[in-house]
Image (cartoon, helix red, strand yellow):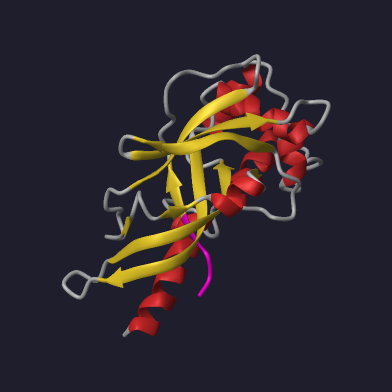
Amino acid sequence: MGDLIYITSRRAEPKTDAVARTIPFRLSNAVQDRAGDTVSLSGWKLENYLANPIILWGHDHDLPSIGRMARLGLEGDWLVGDVTFATKEQHPFADTIFRLVDGGFINAGSVGFKPLRWAYREKDGGIDWLEQELLEYSICNIPMHPGALARAVARGVDIAPLADAVGAKNTGSYADLVSKLLASNTPAPHQSTHNVATLRNQVAHRKLRSQLA
């Protein structure tokens, strides 16, 4: 069975430590998601991840890590962590993502995990993930939209590294850039309310349910 991915879109407090380039995130909680599934807060296995606490962009394993998880643990009803981004000198693309997140233009993060133990609920078809190993944490451009991107550019954020990452560096127009950015996280126009991570998650669920049936 493949790895699973879940999206969260709320940033934790306190606010960004801009000097340290560190931003706190809420990674996961045990509330039932829109697919009817739950992820146990006490079931997180973090040891292996903490040995290599990478931060990815959009679950893309081909791009160099854009940062590291500086702190990770349970606080109340959440698994929370502090993401420290690489500097502009170290990684220009990471710096662009940091500035977009710091400015509020990107607010989404996503956990990628390997299920270890679960229970299938016959009554409603949901799955309770009871134990899971955290593999990586990603920053995602959902729910960034063209208007947010335009405001970022207006405030001086250099989005050239982001454009280059999605193959839009030489598109020749802002509209083309926006189109390619959206396409990088949206498989098809009729699926515009979803994103790649959600779709992968749904596929993984279908495979698991077929195995359990």
Front position in the image: 125 or 135 = 135
Residue at 73 percent of width and 31 percent of height: 86
Magenta segment: does it hold 180?
no
Name the spot of residue 95 as percent of width and height, x first: 71, 28
Name the spot of residue 41 as percent of width and height, x first: 35, 49
Left or right: 59, with 117 as reference point:
right
Residue at 62 percent of width and 51 percent of height: 184
Residue 160 lies in quadrant: top right
Quick check: can you spot residue 58? no
Up the image or down, 101 lies above or below 193; here it is above
Up the image or down, 168 lies above or below 157; here it is below
Residue 69 lies in quadrant: top right
Up the image or down, 157 lies above or below 72; here it is above
Extent of the magenta region: 1-5
Front position in the image: 64 or 194 = 64
Left or right: 66, with 30 as reference point:
right
- Assign the C terminus to one quadrant of the image: bottom left
Name the spot of residue 171 as percent of width and height, x first: 77, 42
Name the spot of residue 22 as percent of width and height, x first: 60, 24
Front position in the image: 138 or 150 = 138
Left or right: 134, with 37 as reference point:
right
Work out which residue is located at the far left of the displayed protein and give it: 123
Front position in the image: 19 or 149 = 19
Quick check: can you spot residue 174? yes
Up the image or down, 193 lies above or below 120; here it is above
Residue at 38 percent of width and 55 percent of height: 43
Please identify the dominant SS of the magenta region: loop
Residue at 78 percent of width and 26 percent of height: 88
